[in-house]
Image (spheres, rainbow, N blue to C red):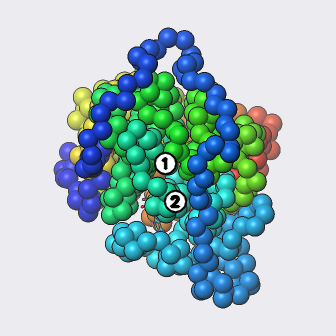
Amino acid sequence: MPGFSDRDRGRDRGYGGAPRFGGGGGGSRGGPPQGKFGNPGERLRKKHWNMDELPKFEKNFYQEHPDVTRRPPQEVENYLRSKEVTVKGRDCPKPMMKFHEANFPNYVMDVIAKQGWAEPTPIQAQGWPLALSGKDMVGIAQTGSGKTLAYLLPAIVHIQHQPFLEHGDGPICLVLAPTRELAQQVQQVAAEYGRASRLKSVCVYGGAPKGPQIRDLERGVEICIATPGRLIDFLEAGKTNLRRCTYLVLDEADRMLDMGFEPQIRKIVDQIRPDRQTLMWSATWPKEVRQLAEDFLKQYVQINVGALQLSANHNILQIVDVCNDGEKDDKLLRLLEEIMSEKENKTIIFTETKRRCDELTRRMRRDGWPAMGIHGDKSQQERDWVLNEFKYGKAPILIATDVASRGLDVEDVKFVINYDYPNSSEDYIHRIGRTARSQKTGTAYTFFTPNNMKQASDLIAVLREANQAINPKLLQMAEARGGNSYGGETGTRLWLHLQT
Ligand code: AMP
Protein backbone atom coordinates (compact mmCIF):
# COMPACT_ATOMS: atom_id res chain seq x y z
CA MET A 1 0.00 0.00 0.00
CA PRO A 2 1.31 3.46 -0.80
CA GLY A 3 2.48 5.67 2.03
CA PHE A 4 0.11 8.43 3.04
CA SER A 5 2.24 11.01 4.64
CA ASP A 6 1.10 14.11 6.43
CA ARG A 7 1.19 17.12 4.25
CA ASP A 8 2.07 20.53 5.42
CA ARG A 9 -0.82 22.74 4.47
CA GLY A 10 1.26 25.81 5.06
CA ARG A 11 -1.19 27.39 7.44
CA ASP A 12 -3.16 26.31 10.39
CA ARG A 13 -6.84 26.39 9.65
CA GLY A 14 -7.61 25.47 13.22
CA TYR A 15 -10.17 22.84 12.38
CA GLY A 16 -12.04 21.15 15.16
CA GLY A 17 -12.44 24.01 17.58
CA ALA A 18 -13.51 27.59 17.39
CA PRO A 19 -10.64 29.94 18.03
CA ARG A 20 -10.96 31.66 21.33
CA PHE A 21 -10.67 35.33 21.79
CA GLY A 22 -9.87 37.35 24.81
CA GLY A 23 -12.28 39.89 26.15
CA GLY A 24 -14.26 40.89 29.17
CA GLY A 25 -16.21 38.61 31.43
CA GLY A 26 -19.94 39.10 30.88
CA GLY A 27 -22.26 37.01 32.98
CA SER A 28 -25.18 34.88 31.99
CA ARG A 29 -28.04 36.69 30.36
CA GLY A 30 -30.81 34.52 31.74
CA GLY A 31 -33.93 34.22 29.58
CA PRO A 32 -36.58 31.54 29.50
CA PRO A 33 -35.53 27.95 30.06
CA GLN A 34 -34.68 26.05 26.95
CA GLY A 35 -37.30 23.70 25.62
CA LYS A 36 -37.63 21.68 22.46
CA PHE A 37 -41.39 21.38 22.38
CA GLY A 38 -43.43 22.31 19.34
CA ASN A 39 -42.08 24.11 16.29
CA PRO A 40 -38.63 25.57 16.37
CA GLY A 41 -38.87 29.24 17.12
CA GLU A 42 -42.45 28.94 18.30
CA ARG A 43 -41.77 31.23 21.22
CA LEU A 44 -40.07 33.88 19.09
CA ARG A 45 -42.49 36.69 18.44
CA LYS A 46 -42.38 38.69 15.21
CA LYS A 47 -41.05 42.10 16.13
CA HIS A 48 -42.96 45.26 15.32
CA TRP A 49 -40.48 47.96 14.59
CA ASN A 50 -40.93 51.60 15.34
CA MET A 51 -38.33 53.10 13.06
CA ASP A 52 -38.37 56.43 14.88
CA GLU A 53 -37.27 54.79 18.09
CA LEU A 54 -34.46 52.69 16.65
CA PRO A 55 -30.97 54.15 17.03
CA LYS A 56 -29.66 55.44 13.70
CA PHE A 57 -26.75 53.67 12.08
CA GLU A 58 -24.52 54.21 9.07
CA LYS A 59 -24.14 51.66 6.29
CA ASN A 60 -22.67 53.51 3.32
CA PHE A 61 -18.88 53.67 3.62
CA TYR A 62 -17.98 53.61 -0.02
CA GLN A 63 -15.63 56.14 -1.49
CA GLU A 64 -14.59 55.43 -5.02
CA HIS A 65 -10.84 55.20 -5.41
CA PRO A 66 -9.38 57.72 -7.93
CA ASP A 67 -8.02 54.82 -10.02
CA VAL A 68 -11.56 53.48 -10.36
CA THR A 69 -12.94 56.91 -11.20
CA ARG A 70 -10.28 57.41 -13.88
CA ARG A 71 -10.80 54.06 -15.53
CA PRO A 72 -12.33 54.43 -19.01
CA PRO A 73 -15.84 52.95 -19.34
CA GLN A 74 -14.63 50.75 -22.20
CA GLU A 75 -12.04 49.10 -19.96
CA VAL A 76 -14.69 48.47 -17.30
CA GLU A 77 -17.00 47.00 -19.87
CA ASN A 78 -14.28 44.74 -21.25
CA TYR A 79 -13.44 43.54 -17.75
CA LEU A 80 -17.05 42.68 -16.94
CA ARG A 81 -17.52 40.95 -20.26
CA SER A 82 -14.33 38.91 -20.04
CA LYS A 83 -15.18 37.80 -16.48
CA GLU A 84 -18.78 37.09 -17.45
CA VAL A 85 -20.12 39.44 -14.78
CA THR A 86 -23.65 40.69 -15.28
CA VAL A 87 -25.33 43.24 -13.06
CA LYS A 88 -29.03 43.87 -12.63
CA GLY A 89 -30.44 46.75 -10.63
CA ARG A 90 -29.86 50.46 -10.24
CA ASP A 91 -26.83 52.48 -9.20
CA CYS A 92 -24.31 49.69 -9.00
CA PRO A 93 -20.83 51.14 -8.45
CA LYS A 94 -18.01 50.32 -10.87
CA PRO A 95 -15.97 47.17 -10.14
CA MET A 96 -12.59 47.36 -8.43
CA MET A 97 -10.00 45.49 -10.41
CA LYS A 98 -7.18 45.83 -7.90
CA PHE A 99 -7.05 45.18 -4.18
CA HIS A 100 -5.86 48.68 -3.24
CA GLU A 101 -8.96 50.18 -4.84
CA ALA A 102 -11.11 48.76 -2.05
CA ASN A 103 -9.50 51.03 0.57
CA PHE A 104 -9.76 48.32 3.21
CA PRO A 105 -8.01 49.09 6.50
CA ASN A 106 -4.28 48.29 6.56
CA TYR A 107 -4.68 45.29 8.86
CA VAL A 108 -7.04 43.71 6.31
CA MET A 109 -4.72 44.56 3.43
CA ASP A 110 -1.82 42.96 5.30
CA VAL A 111 -3.67 39.64 5.53
CA ILE A 112 -4.61 39.82 1.84
CA ALA A 113 -1.01 40.60 0.90
CA LYS A 114 0.16 37.46 2.70
CA GLN A 115 -2.06 35.26 0.49
CA GLY A 116 -0.14 36.21 -2.64
CA TRP A 117 -3.27 36.59 -4.77
CA ALA A 118 -3.01 38.51 -8.03
CA GLU A 119 -6.29 40.40 -7.95
CA PRO A 120 -9.83 40.31 -6.59
CA THR A 121 -12.02 37.56 -8.00
CA PRO A 122 -14.89 38.87 -10.17
CA ILE A 123 -17.43 38.46 -7.38
CA GLN A 124 -15.15 40.44 -5.05
CA ALA A 125 -14.42 43.09 -7.70
CA GLN A 126 -18.09 43.82 -8.18
CA GLY A 127 -19.34 42.73 -4.75
CA TRP A 128 -17.06 44.89 -2.60
CA PRO A 129 -18.08 48.34 -3.86
CA LEU A 130 -21.71 47.28 -3.77
CA ALA A 131 -21.55 45.90 -0.23
CA LEU A 132 -19.48 48.85 1.00
CA SER A 133 -22.07 51.27 -0.32
CA GLY A 134 -24.64 49.80 2.05
CA LYS A 135 -26.91 48.40 -0.64
CA ASP A 136 -28.79 45.15 -0.43
CA MET A 137 -27.43 42.65 -2.90
CA VAL A 138 -27.79 39.20 -4.36
CA GLY A 139 -24.67 37.39 -5.54
CA ILE A 140 -25.05 34.35 -7.73
CA ALA A 141 -21.81 32.56 -7.05
CA GLN A 142 -20.63 29.33 -5.53
CA THR A 143 -18.07 28.30 -3.04
CA GLY A 144 -14.77 28.61 -4.82
CA SER A 145 -15.57 32.01 -6.31
CA GLY A 146 -14.16 34.00 -3.40
CA LYS A 147 -17.60 34.94 -2.10
CA THR A 148 -16.73 34.56 1.58
CA LEU A 149 -14.37 37.52 1.46
CA ALA A 150 -16.78 39.31 -0.86
CA TYR A 151 -19.14 39.67 2.10
CA LEU A 152 -16.82 39.39 5.11
CA LEU A 153 -14.43 42.24 4.35
CA PRO A 154 -17.23 44.81 3.88
CA ALA A 155 -18.71 43.35 7.10
CA ILE A 156 -15.50 44.25 8.94
CA VAL A 157 -15.69 47.82 7.62
CA HIS A 158 -19.37 47.98 8.58
CA ILE A 159 -18.66 46.80 12.12
CA GLN A 160 -15.74 49.18 12.61
CA HIS A 161 -18.11 52.07 11.96
CA GLN A 162 -20.65 50.99 14.57
CA PRO A 163 -20.57 51.80 18.30
CA PHE A 164 -18.72 49.21 20.45
CA LEU A 165 -20.69 46.27 21.73
CA GLU A 166 -22.06 46.72 25.20
CA HIS A 167 -22.79 44.07 27.77
CA GLY A 168 -25.78 42.03 26.61
CA ASP A 169 -25.50 43.04 22.95
CA GLY A 170 -25.77 40.37 20.27
CA PRO A 171 -23.74 40.33 17.03
CA ILE A 172 -23.60 43.17 14.51
CA CYS A 173 -23.00 40.84 11.57
CA LEU A 174 -24.97 37.61 11.25
CA VAL A 175 -24.10 35.03 8.61
CA LEU A 176 -26.63 32.23 8.14
CA ALA A 177 -25.25 29.11 6.46
CA PRO A 178 -26.83 25.74 5.64
CA THR A 179 -24.24 23.35 7.10
CA ARG A 180 -21.82 23.15 9.98
CA GLU A 181 -18.98 22.63 7.54
CA LEU A 182 -19.67 25.82 5.64
CA ALA A 183 -20.31 27.76 8.87
CA GLN A 184 -16.96 26.60 10.25
CA GLN A 185 -15.14 27.48 7.05
CA VAL A 186 -16.62 30.97 7.07
CA GLN A 187 -15.67 31.41 10.70
CA GLN A 188 -12.08 30.46 10.00
CA VAL A 189 -11.93 33.22 7.43
CA ALA A 190 -13.67 35.62 9.84
CA ALA A 191 -11.16 34.72 12.53
CA GLU A 192 -8.20 35.14 10.21
CA TYR A 193 -9.22 38.61 9.06
CA GLY A 194 -10.97 39.66 12.28
CA ARG A 195 -7.98 38.85 14.51
CA ALA A 196 -6.01 41.84 13.32
CA SER A 197 -8.98 44.14 13.83
CA ARG A 198 -9.82 42.62 17.23
CA LEU A 199 -13.23 41.54 16.05
CA LYS A 200 -14.58 38.47 17.74
CA SER A 201 -16.56 35.82 15.94
CA VAL A 202 -18.43 32.70 16.92
CA CYS A 203 -19.68 29.71 15.01
CA VAL A 204 -23.03 28.42 16.18
CA TYR A 205 -24.21 25.07 14.84
CA GLY A 206 -26.14 22.00 15.87
CA GLY A 207 -24.73 18.63 16.82
CA ALA A 208 -22.08 20.07 19.13
CA PRO A 209 -22.28 20.94 22.84
CA LYS A 210 -24.06 24.23 23.46
CA GLY A 211 -21.96 25.37 26.41
CA PRO A 212 -18.88 26.67 24.60
CA GLN A 213 -20.98 28.38 21.92
CA ILE A 214 -23.10 30.08 24.59
CA ARG A 215 -20.01 31.20 26.46
CA ASP A 216 -18.57 32.76 23.31
CA LEU A 217 -21.87 34.49 22.56
CA GLU A 218 -22.14 35.82 26.07
CA ARG A 219 -18.63 37.19 25.96
CA GLY A 220 -19.83 39.43 23.16
CA VAL A 221 -19.09 38.80 19.48
CA GLU A 222 -19.34 41.17 16.55
CA ILE A 223 -19.71 38.36 14.00
CA CYS A 224 -21.90 35.30 14.42
CA ILE A 225 -21.92 32.56 11.81
CA ALA A 226 -24.78 30.19 12.40
CA THR A 227 -26.84 27.36 11.06
CA PRO A 228 -30.50 28.33 11.48
CA GLY A 229 -31.71 25.64 13.91
CA ARG A 230 -29.13 26.20 16.63
CA LEU A 231 -29.43 29.97 16.39
CA ILE A 232 -33.20 29.71 16.89
CA ASP A 233 -32.56 27.62 20.02
CA PHE A 234 -30.27 30.30 21.40
CA LEU A 235 -32.59 33.16 20.48
CA GLU A 236 -35.53 31.41 22.14
CA ALA A 237 -33.50 30.74 25.24
CA GLY A 238 -32.35 34.37 25.37
CA LYS A 239 -28.69 33.38 25.00
CA THR A 240 -28.26 36.01 22.33
CA ASN A 241 -30.34 38.58 20.49
CA LEU A 242 -30.28 40.38 17.15
CA ARG A 243 -31.02 43.91 18.37
CA ARG A 244 -27.63 45.16 17.20
CA CYS A 245 -27.64 43.20 13.94
CA THR A 246 -27.36 45.57 10.98
CA TYR A 247 -25.47 43.40 8.46
CA LEU A 248 -27.16 40.15 7.50
CA VAL A 249 -25.69 37.56 5.15
CA LEU A 250 -27.62 34.56 3.83
CA ASP A 251 -25.01 32.22 2.42
CA GLU A 252 -25.98 29.41 0.04
CA ALA A 253 -29.61 30.47 0.23
CA ASP A 254 -30.67 27.85 -2.31
CA ARG A 255 -29.09 25.13 -0.22
CA MET A 256 -30.77 26.38 2.96
CA LEU A 257 -34.14 26.21 1.21
CA ASP A 258 -33.33 22.71 -0.13
CA MET A 259 -32.66 21.64 3.41
CA GLY A 260 -36.00 22.96 4.62
CA PHE A 261 -34.71 25.89 6.66
CA GLU A 262 -37.13 28.44 5.27
CA PRO A 263 -39.38 28.71 8.37
CA GLN A 264 -36.35 29.11 10.62
CA ILE A 265 -34.79 31.71 8.35
CA ARG A 266 -38.01 33.71 8.33
CA LYS A 267 -38.23 33.55 12.13
CA ILE A 268 -34.67 34.76 12.47
CA VAL A 269 -35.00 37.57 9.94
CA ASP A 270 -38.13 38.76 11.75
CA GLN A 271 -35.88 39.48 14.73
CA ILE A 272 -33.64 41.86 12.76
CA ARG A 273 -34.37 45.54 12.17
CA PRO A 274 -35.77 46.08 8.66
CA ASP A 275 -33.31 48.85 7.70
CA ARG A 276 -30.38 46.42 8.02
CA GLN A 277 -28.17 45.70 5.04
CA THR A 278 -28.90 42.27 3.59
CA LEU A 279 -26.61 40.26 1.32
CA MET A 280 -27.87 37.04 -0.15
CA TRP A 281 -25.71 34.44 -1.89
CA SER A 282 -26.84 31.51 -3.92
CA ALA A 283 -25.39 29.21 -6.56
CA THR A 284 -28.73 29.03 -8.35
CA TRP A 285 -31.67 31.35 -8.83
CA PRO A 286 -34.88 29.32 -8.77
CA LYS A 287 -38.18 30.94 -7.90
CA GLU A 288 -38.05 30.03 -4.20
CA VAL A 289 -34.78 31.91 -3.83
CA ARG A 290 -36.16 34.85 -5.82
CA GLN A 291 -39.11 34.97 -3.45
CA LEU A 292 -36.81 35.08 -0.45
CA ALA A 293 -34.92 37.98 -2.05
CA GLU A 294 -38.18 39.82 -2.69
CA ASP A 295 -39.23 39.36 0.93
CA PHE A 296 -35.95 40.19 2.66
CA LEU A 297 -34.12 42.64 0.41
CA LYS A 298 -34.90 46.22 -0.60
CA GLN A 299 -34.09 47.64 -4.05
CA TYR A 300 -31.31 45.19 -4.41
CA VAL A 301 -28.65 44.87 -7.05
CA GLN A 302 -27.93 41.42 -8.38
CA ILE A 303 -24.58 40.21 -9.60
CA ASN A 304 -24.12 37.03 -11.63
CA VAL A 305 -20.75 35.66 -12.40
CA GLY A 306 -20.53 33.08 -15.13
CA ALA A 307 -22.49 31.86 -18.09
CA LEU A 308 -26.24 32.00 -17.69
CA GLN A 309 -26.67 28.27 -17.83
CA LEU A 310 -25.83 25.14 -15.97
CA SER A 311 -22.11 24.74 -16.33
CA ALA A 312 -19.22 22.95 -14.74
CA ASN A 313 -15.72 24.15 -13.99
CA HIS A 314 -13.74 23.76 -17.21
CA ASN A 315 -10.58 22.77 -15.38
CA ILE A 316 -12.09 19.38 -14.60
CA LEU A 317 -11.61 16.39 -16.85
CA GLN A 318 -14.95 14.57 -16.76
CA ILE A 319 -15.00 10.85 -17.52
CA VAL A 320 -18.26 8.95 -17.59
CA ASP A 321 -18.19 5.16 -17.39
CA VAL A 322 -21.47 3.63 -18.49
CA CYS A 323 -21.81 0.33 -16.61
CA ASN A 324 -24.10 -1.86 -14.53
CA ASP A 325 -24.52 -1.62 -10.78
CA GLY A 326 -22.80 -4.98 -10.30
CA GLU A 327 -19.64 -3.76 -12.02
CA LYS A 328 -19.10 -0.70 -9.85
CA ASP A 329 -17.00 -2.30 -7.09
CA ASP A 330 -14.53 -3.82 -9.51
CA LYS A 331 -14.23 -0.63 -11.47
CA LEU A 332 -13.76 1.39 -8.30
CA LEU A 333 -10.98 -0.88 -7.16
CA ARG A 334 -9.10 -0.57 -10.43
CA LEU A 335 -9.58 3.18 -10.47
CA LEU A 336 -8.31 3.58 -6.93
CA GLU A 337 -5.25 1.46 -7.59
CA GLU A 338 -4.37 3.82 -10.39
CA ILE A 339 -5.18 6.96 -8.41
CA MET A 340 -3.27 5.91 -5.32
CA SER A 341 -0.13 5.38 -7.36
CA GLU A 342 -0.23 9.11 -8.18
CA LYS A 343 1.66 11.58 -6.05
CA GLU A 344 -1.38 13.79 -5.60
CA ASN A 345 -4.25 11.47 -4.90
CA LYS A 346 -6.82 13.09 -2.63
CA THR A 347 -10.16 11.63 -3.66
CA ILE A 348 -13.81 12.03 -2.71
CA ILE A 349 -16.17 9.16 -3.52
CA PHE A 350 -19.86 10.07 -3.53
CA THR A 351 -22.59 7.60 -2.69
CA GLU A 352 -26.32 8.11 -2.82
CA THR A 353 -27.23 6.90 0.65
CA LYS A 354 -25.76 6.97 4.12
CA ARG A 355 -26.00 3.20 4.25
CA ARG A 356 -24.03 2.77 1.06
CA CYS A 357 -21.49 5.25 2.39
CA ASP A 358 -21.06 3.20 5.60
CA GLU A 359 -20.88 -0.11 3.73
CA LEU A 360 -18.34 1.09 1.25
CA THR A 361 -16.22 2.68 3.97
CA ARG A 362 -16.28 -0.53 5.98
CA ARG A 363 -15.32 -2.70 3.03
CA MET A 364 -12.56 -0.41 1.85
CA ARG A 365 -11.04 -0.07 5.30
CA ARG A 366 -11.17 -3.84 5.73
CA ASP A 367 -9.18 -4.13 2.51
CA GLY A 368 -6.61 -1.67 3.77
CA TRP A 369 -7.60 1.50 1.92
CA PRO A 370 -6.99 4.77 3.79
CA ALA A 371 -10.66 5.73 3.54
CA MET A 372 -13.09 7.45 5.88
CA GLY A 373 -16.81 8.15 5.62
CA ILE A 374 -18.86 11.26 6.28
CA HIS A 375 -22.62 11.77 6.19
CA GLY A 376 -25.40 13.55 7.98
CA ASP A 377 -25.93 10.90 10.69
CA LYS A 378 -22.38 11.13 12.02
CA SER A 379 -21.82 13.16 15.14
CA GLN A 380 -20.32 16.58 14.79
CA GLN A 381 -17.15 15.45 16.52
CA GLU A 382 -16.72 12.57 14.11
CA ARG A 383 -17.38 14.74 11.06
CA ASP A 384 -14.82 17.30 12.21
CA TRP A 385 -12.29 14.58 12.81
CA VAL A 386 -12.86 12.85 9.48
CA LEU A 387 -12.65 16.14 7.57
CA ASN A 388 -9.44 16.97 9.36
CA GLU A 389 -7.88 13.61 8.52
CA PHE A 390 -8.87 14.16 4.91
CA LYS A 391 -7.74 17.78 4.72
CA TYR A 392 -4.32 17.03 6.09
CA GLY A 393 -3.85 13.92 3.95
CA LYS A 394 -3.90 11.26 6.68
CA ALA A 395 -6.87 9.60 5.04
CA PRO A 396 -6.76 10.70 1.41
CA ILE A 397 -10.00 8.94 0.48
CA LEU A 398 -13.24 10.48 1.71
CA ILE A 399 -16.49 8.62 1.11
CA ALA A 400 -19.41 11.00 1.35
CA THR A 401 -23.08 11.58 0.73
CA ASP A 402 -24.19 14.91 -0.72
CA VAL A 403 -23.73 16.53 2.67
CA ALA A 404 -20.15 17.09 1.58
CA SER A 405 -20.84 18.09 -1.99
CA ARG A 406 -21.35 21.80 -1.41
CA GLY A 407 -19.37 24.19 0.60
CA LEU A 408 -16.53 21.75 1.24
CA ASP A 409 -13.37 23.65 0.43
CA VAL A 410 -10.35 21.37 0.53
CA GLU A 411 -7.73 22.85 -1.72
CA ASP A 412 -6.03 19.81 -3.19
CA VAL A 413 -8.76 17.31 -4.03
CA LYS A 414 -7.56 15.76 -7.29
CA PHE A 415 -10.29 13.22 -7.99
CA VAL A 416 -14.00 12.95 -7.50
CA ILE A 417 -15.68 9.60 -8.10
CA ASN A 418 -19.43 9.45 -8.46
CA TYR A 419 -19.94 5.89 -7.30
CA ASP A 420 -23.66 6.63 -7.51
CA TYR A 421 -24.92 9.27 -9.92
CA PRO A 422 -26.61 12.13 -8.03
CA ASN A 423 -30.25 13.17 -8.30
CA SER A 424 -29.65 16.08 -10.61
CA SER A 425 -27.01 17.52 -12.89
CA GLU A 426 -26.91 20.49 -10.54
CA ASP A 427 -25.72 18.18 -7.75
CA TYR A 428 -23.32 16.59 -10.22
CA ILE A 429 -21.75 19.98 -10.89
CA HIS A 430 -21.46 20.73 -7.19
CA ARG A 431 -19.89 17.37 -6.46
CA ILE A 432 -17.28 17.50 -9.18
CA GLY A 433 -16.59 21.11 -8.20
CA ARG A 434 -14.90 19.77 -5.04
CA THR A 435 -11.86 19.25 -7.23
CA ALA A 436 -9.98 21.83 -9.35
CA ARG A 437 -10.30 24.55 -6.69
CA SER A 438 -8.64 27.93 -7.24
CA GLN A 439 -7.40 27.40 -10.80
CA LYS A 440 -6.07 23.88 -10.17
CA THR A 441 -7.08 20.91 -12.30
CA GLY A 442 -8.88 17.72 -11.35
CA THR A 443 -10.59 14.64 -12.70
CA ALA A 444 -14.12 13.42 -12.12
CA TYR A 445 -15.09 9.78 -12.78
CA THR A 446 -18.75 8.92 -12.90
CA PHE A 447 -20.39 5.52 -12.91
CA PHE A 448 -23.55 5.87 -14.91
CA THR A 449 -25.97 2.94 -14.94
CA PRO A 450 -29.22 2.21 -16.79
CA ASN A 451 -31.03 3.31 -13.62
CA ASN A 452 -29.74 6.82 -14.26
CA MET A 453 -30.94 6.81 -17.84
CA LYS A 454 -33.37 9.66 -17.47
CA GLN A 455 -30.51 11.97 -16.51
CA ALA A 456 -28.43 11.12 -19.57
CA SER A 457 -29.35 14.12 -21.71
CA ASP A 458 -28.80 16.61 -18.86
CA LEU A 459 -25.36 15.13 -18.24
CA ILE A 460 -24.55 15.32 -21.94
CA ALA A 461 -25.43 19.02 -21.89
CA VAL A 462 -23.00 19.60 -19.02
CA LEU A 463 -20.24 17.65 -20.77
CA ARG A 464 -20.79 19.45 -24.07
CA GLU A 465 -20.71 22.86 -22.44
CA ALA A 466 -17.35 22.00 -20.89
CA ASN A 467 -15.97 20.61 -24.20
CA GLN A 468 -15.58 17.09 -22.82
CA ALA A 469 -15.44 13.88 -24.83
CA ILE A 470 -18.78 12.09 -24.60
CA ASN A 471 -19.00 8.37 -24.11
CA PRO A 472 -20.96 6.93 -27.08
CA LYS A 473 -22.85 4.63 -24.70
CA LEU A 474 -24.15 7.69 -22.92
CA LEU A 475 -25.34 9.15 -26.21
CA GLN A 476 -27.05 5.86 -27.02
CA MET A 477 -28.84 5.94 -23.68
CA ALA A 478 -30.11 9.45 -24.26
CA GLU A 479 -31.29 8.51 -27.72
CA ALA A 480 -32.88 5.25 -26.54
CA ARG A 481 -34.92 7.31 -24.14
CA GLY A 482 -36.13 9.35 -27.04
CA GLY A 483 -34.58 12.49 -25.62
CA ASN A 484 -32.51 14.76 -27.74
CA SER A 485 -28.87 13.98 -27.26
CA TYR A 486 -28.04 17.66 -27.10
CA GLY A 487 -29.53 17.72 -23.64
CA GLY A 488 -30.11 20.99 -21.90
CA GLU A 489 -33.58 20.14 -20.63
CA THR A 490 -32.90 21.14 -17.07
CA GLY A 491 -36.31 22.56 -16.38
CA THR A 492 -35.25 25.61 -14.44
CA ARG A 493 -32.74 27.93 -15.93
CA LEU A 494 -29.79 27.82 -13.64
CA TRP A 495 -27.13 30.37 -13.12
CA LEU A 496 -23.99 28.81 -11.88
CA HIS A 497 -20.60 30.27 -11.49
CA LEU A 498 -18.31 29.31 -14.29
CA GLN A 499 -14.84 29.00 -12.89
CA THR A 500 -12.45 29.13 -15.82
P1 AMP B 1 -14.89 30.91 -1.33
O1 AMP B 1 -15.65 31.08 -2.60
O2 AMP B 1 -15.05 32.05 -0.41
O3 AMP B 1 -15.20 29.57 -0.70
O4 AMP B 1 -13.30 30.91 -1.69
C1 AMP B 1 -12.68 29.89 -2.38
C2 AMP B 1 -11.18 29.93 -2.30
O5 AMP B 1 -10.66 31.03 -3.03
C3 AMP B 1 -10.64 30.05 -0.88
O6 AMP B 1 -9.70 29.03 -0.70
C4 AMP B 1 -9.99 31.41 -0.84
O7 AMP B 1 -8.86 31.40 -0.01
C5 AMP B 1 -9.62 31.67 -2.30
N1 AMP B 1 -9.65 33.12 -2.68
C6 AMP B 1 -10.41 34.09 -2.17
N2 AMP B 1 -10.16 35.27 -2.77
C7 AMP B 1 -9.23 35.04 -3.71
C8 AMP B 1 -8.55 35.87 -4.69
N3 AMP B 1 -8.82 37.17 -4.81
N4 AMP B 1 -7.65 35.27 -5.50
C9 AMP B 1 -7.39 33.95 -5.40
N5 AMP B 1 -7.97 33.12 -4.51
C10 AMP B 1 -8.89 33.65 -3.67
Sequence-wise first label, 1 or 2: 2
Can you give x and y, in whole percent of width and height, for residue 416 in the image? 45, 47
The quadrant of the image that shows the C terminus is bottom right
Up-down relation of residue 197 to residue 19 (above or below): below
Per the rendering, the mark at residue 158 is 2
Q: Residue at x 60, y 70 (%)?
A: 62
At label 1, the amino acid type is Ile
Q: Residue at x 43, y 18 (%)?
A: 32
Q: Secondary structure at mark 1?
A: loop
Can you give x and y, in whole percent of width and height, for residue 58 in the image? 59, 59
Per the rendering, the mark at residue 500 is none
- The CA distance from mark 1 to mark 2 is 9 Å
* Residue 191 vs residue 391, the one in the foreground: 191
CB within 8 Å, label 1 to label 2: yes
Q: Secondary structure at mark 2?
A: helix
Residue 81 location, quadrant: bottom right
Left-right relation of 230 to 258: left
Identify the residue position indicated by label 1 in the image. 172
Up-down relation of residue 37 to residue 386 (above or below): above
The verdict on label 1 being within 8 Å of ligand 1 is no
The verdict on label 2 being within 8 Å of ligand 1 is no
Left-right relation of 171 to 451: left
* Image label count: 2
